[in-house]
Image (cartoon, helix red, strand yellow):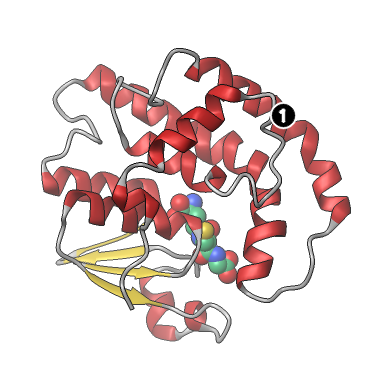
Amino acid sequence: MKIYWIKAQAPMRVLALIKHLGVAAELIRIDPVTGGLHTPEYKALNLNRKAPTMVDGEVTLWESSAIMAHIAIKAGSDMWPTENLDEQVQVLRWLTWNEGHWTPAVGPYYVEHIVKKTFNMGPPDAKVLEKAAKNCVKYAKVLDAHLEGRDFVACDRLTLADFALASMARYWREAEMPFEDFPNITRWLDGLAHIPAWKNPWPEE
Ligand SMILES: N[C@@H](CCC(=O)N[C@@H](CS)C(=O)NCC(=O)O)C(=O)O
């Protein structure tokens, strides 16, 4: 299995999962700054020109949730439930919510404070952040209420939903996400930080 990755959050979920489950894979780092996502070879694998992309034998996949499901199935892990389909639907619900609501809600903070710094793209844009606050709080309320009395997002155990949702928010302090009034979210994020593969998802280089 080959995983093409850049140092950003969608690929990070996949890298963390691979490490957590001990799956053997060739991890190929791409430099987005020098056009690595726009080469003819990469576009032949992923016309979105985004990372991650997985190639496993005949299967080429993009979208981190789909890649994580493929890896979990292959590893026989119930982080993507395949025996109890009600559980699978619960995980799917949160993976979908992540793409549709959570990522757009917290993404601007992550991009302005973390991505720009990582790739030397200049200072955070205060106007973008000001505009983002209302949406972020709206969806943080949803997640915080759901996490009341829970340590994990779905199925009372670690699933792909935790890695997907937490990836955008793990640097909430540095990214200045307005989570001070959402103690269940910050407790959950701090709890995940105890998982070694989550704490250090990046490959040794
Ligand atoms: N929904 C996609 C998101 C893919 C995506 O947007 N990847 C970002 C990194 S988190 C990327 O490749 N950005 C590089 C660029 O847009 O040039 C997934 O989950 O895989």
Question: Looking at the image, can residue 63 be seen?
Answer: no
Q: From the viewer's perspective, is residue 70 above or below residue 40?
A: above
Report the residue at 72% width, 36% height from top: 178
Disc 1 CB within 8 Å of nearest ligand 1 atom: no
Task: Tell me where residue 103 sits by quadrant.
Answer: top right
Q: From the viewer's perspective, is residue 24 above or below residue 155?
A: below
Q: Position of residue 75 (x, y in %)?
A: 12, 47
Quadrant holding the N terminus: bottom left
Report the residue at 64% width, 53% height from top: 110
Q: In this view, does 107 lie to the left or right of 56?
A: right
Q: Where is residue 23 in the image (x, y as percent from the top left)?
A: 16, 57
Amino acid type of disc 1? Val
Report the residue at 21% width, 30% height from top: 81
Count every numbered label the image shows and give the total.
1
Task: Tell me where residue 89 sits by quadrant.
Answer: top left
**Front residue (pair 57, 129):** 129
Q: Which SS class for mark 1?
A: helix
Report the residue at 70% width, 49% height from top: 109
**Front residue (pair 18, 38):** 18
Q: From the viewer's perspective, is residue 123 above or below residue 144?
A: below
- Residue at image mark 1: 137
Q: In this view, does 111 lie to the left or right of 184?
A: right
